[in-house]
Amino acid sequence: MSGYANRMASASKQASKRLLTASGEAKARWLALVATALREQTETLLSANQLDLANAADHGLSEAMADRLTLTDDRLEGIATAVDEIAALPNPVGEIIDGSVRPNGMQVTRVRVPLGVVFFIYESRPNVTVDAAALCVKSGNAVILRGGKEAVHTNVAFHSLLVSALETAGLPAEAVQLVDNPDRSLVGDFLALGDLIDVAIPRGGRSLIERVSDESRMPVIRHFDGICHVYVDQFADLNRVVPIILNAKCQRPGVCNAAESLLIHSEVAEVMLPAIATELLKQGVELRGCERCCQIVPEFKPATEQDYATEYLSLVLSVRIVDSLQHAIQHIDQYGSGHTEAILTGDLASAQEFTTCVDASAVIVNASTRFNDGGELGLGAEIGISTDKFHARGPCGLRELTSYKYIVTGPSAPDWTGVR
């Protein structure tokens, strides 16, 4: 099997070198062709997706995972719109980050360059196939896509239109390759190719990410658990709190930026918690709370310590009453995953302390955790939300798929031969 991975990675490396000189116009044309094909081939794409959905039970997919796998007309339009938005963003390749002229006349410029070859491995999210390809090629990278077997038919259909558009746009077809062999050992073969692949990006469950981190011979941009909190401060406005919490938990519970835990200040819990719980229960949310929560709202089930450390990805919410802002921050430090944390408050000092002290890829004030999203933050789309601190953090868009290099130009004066 190593020959299979080697051949694919070698082709990607060559494609990445050709992309270095590809014009922004050629990449923009490719993106326009992809967006058009997504809209024109809706029936074909939905039919392929139905084949995968028919096998969802055989693959043991949970309701949340099946929802992630599902394509609809609206979701396909959303994917096409994301491609349009990526096309409209500035081309990051060659962007001058900063520059200076040294006292000896030497010109020093730092410019953005592609990472090279990206090995992207992901589960159950066929829309990610298009997002990842669009972001990688626009930022000058070749990408090897390894989706889950549960989405194989959908991914093959997406890949077909992506490659057809590459060829029409005059770009190398090998810039976007799909691993269509479900053999799990192949993942290890690709991760061993540190001389051909520049970065690995896993997007899926903890076991997948831990395996990639352990076996990779190249840098890894990791997307760990999304144990996201909403903290209702003592200065929060109930009329604003309820719709924000409903969006954070219920709009799409199976995604990584959905709220998994609610913290509420003890001074407002008696008034706010019943109102919040009533609306969440109407949406079918199972509430698991501390002893004080259970005393205020009888519908609560007692929460365990494990509940506060769980990414449910479903209509289950852990809740705890805290006695201070500092108590809320301590809870998040203990149980949070560094993904997204939100505070609902009308007090500027509380908001500033929360945003300063909470360690997460995004800290949100008076809005839903769902806003930690590439599209919502103006990135067009994302290849994932990194919970690491190096090299990228938060939604990974075009710029996060680049590095930089220094370009140094000698002065016109005679003394240009080098360091003395």
Image: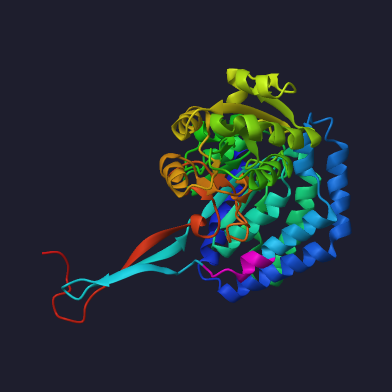
**Which part of the image, by quadrant, shows the N terminus?**
top right
Main SS of residues in magenta: helix
Q: Nearer the viewer, residue 95 or 170?
A: 95
Q: Does residue 185 appear in this view?
A: no
Q: Quadrant of residue 266?
A: top right
Q: Nearer the viewer, residue 374 or 108?
A: 374
User: Which residue is found at the position 47% from the left and 35% from the top?
Assistant: 325
The magenta stretch spans residue 86: yes
Q: Name the outermost residue toward the left.
A: 420
Tell me if residue 108 comes above or below residue 63 in the rendering.
below
User: Which residue is found at the position 69% from the left and 36% from the top?
Assistant: 276
The magenta stretch spans residue 211: no
Q: Position of residue 257 (x, y in %)?
A: 62, 43
Question: What span is in magenta?
Answer: 84-91
Instruction: Locate residue 19 relative to residue 53 in the image: left or right.
Output: left
Q: Nearer the viewer, residue 366 or 392?
A: 366
Q: Quadrant of residue 61?
A: top right
Q: Does residue 28 appear in this view?
A: yes
Q: Nearer the viewer, residue 20 or 94?
A: 94
Q: Position of residue 87 (x, y in %)?
A: 63, 68
**Which part of the image, by quadrant, shows the C terminus?**
bottom left
Instruction: Locate residue 149 relative to residue 418 in the image: left or right.
Output: right
Q: Position of residue 332 (x, y in %)?
A: 50, 32
